[in-house]
Amino acid sequence: MKNFDVAAVVSGGASGLGEATTRALAARGAAVTIMDLNQERGQALAAELGGHTTFVRTDVTDEASVEAAVAEATGKDRPLRIAISCAGIGLAQRTVGRDGAPHELGGFTRVLGVNLIGTFNVLRLAAAAMARTEPGEEGERGVVVNTASIAAFDGQIGQLAYSASKGGVVGMTLPAARDLSSVGVRVCTIAPGLVDTPLLGSLPEEARAALSGGIPFPKRLGRPSDFAELALAIVENGYLNGEVIRMDGALRMAPR
Ligand SMILES: NC(=O)c1ccc[n+]([C@@H]2O[C@H](COP(=O)([O-])OP(=O)(O)OC[C@H]3O[C@@H](n4cnc5c(N)ncnc54)[C@H](O)[C@@H]3O)[C@@H](O)[C@H]2O)c1
């Protein structure tokens, strides 16, 4: 898809990787709907970007909430062709803690709810809306980009719930692409390594240096713009489909 004169939805679009992607899409002329729980940041970003960028307070785990945001996006003056899922949360807890306590069931369910079920919720509702649009020359109607993590493959100690949720996103990618081939919607997933978002930005410089020291090359944390560029490259390359792409400077995470 070379033409960004389309509508797009970005979940988690008010912060970090999602914010960078919202900015990149808006800079290319897309009419972006920011779907995020964080009303303050979302509204401020939409106001800053102006034009066709809007914010709809959205909880990705909630059916009606995502339906309303997708309806807002489809109400714009151009077809919905792009859905990027960046909403996500973390949790650090061991399967059995040092004190012998088992991993909380509620925490596991919460992380799976946002990262896996939320991603699925955006994927299915956005794809259904795309399926109702007029196709392009090769039958293409749109593209969905999910966000996993390299923790889907090399989950560290304490990352059980997070890794399981991201492993689910990886596992969903190919069957979703196969399912949606009949309506011309592509599905790819980005598995980022360590990216310098507000989350990592809160760490002291020393800790950030230690983290980036383990990255073969480039010897730095990823930038949110690296993610946004890859997301846009996936949108632009109409032959990429059903694939999970690691974006990590060749980092393979150790157990801890
Ligand atoms: N930063 C990294 O190093 C890194 C690495 C690998 C994967 N990821 C993944 O990338 C994605 C974005 O991470 P980030 O670092 O930009 O984090 P972030 O915290 O900066 O942004 C996440 C956004 O998601 C929103 N959100 C959370 N729960 C939501 C919900 N239920 N509904 C709607 N919005 C919700 C938050 O309000 C926030 O704006 C996440 O899925 C994360 O797991 C990040």
Image: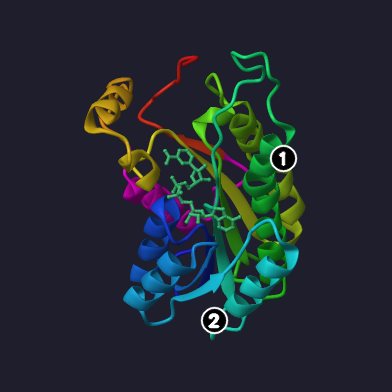
Q: Is residue 129 visible?
A: yes
**Residue 78 bears which disc, if any?**
2
What residue would you read off at disc 1? 109
The answer to whether residue 225 is left or right of residue 10 is left
Label 1 is placed on what type of residue?
A: Thr
Give me the residue at 69% from left, 46% from top. 113
Give me the residue at 57% from left, 68% from top. 81
Give me the residue at 61% from left, 83% from top. 75
124 or 180, which is in the foreground? 124
Q: Which residues are the magenta region?
A: 222-243
92 or 250, which is in the foreground? 92
Q: Is residue 219 visible?
A: no
Image position, residue 207 (x, y; %): 29, 27
256 or 245, which is in the foreground? 256
The answer to whether residue 198 is left or right of residue 114 is left
Image position, residue 204 (x, y; %): 26, 33
Q: Quadrant of residue 181?
A: bottom right
**Residue 219 bears which disc, if any?**
none
38 or 14, which is in the foreground? 38
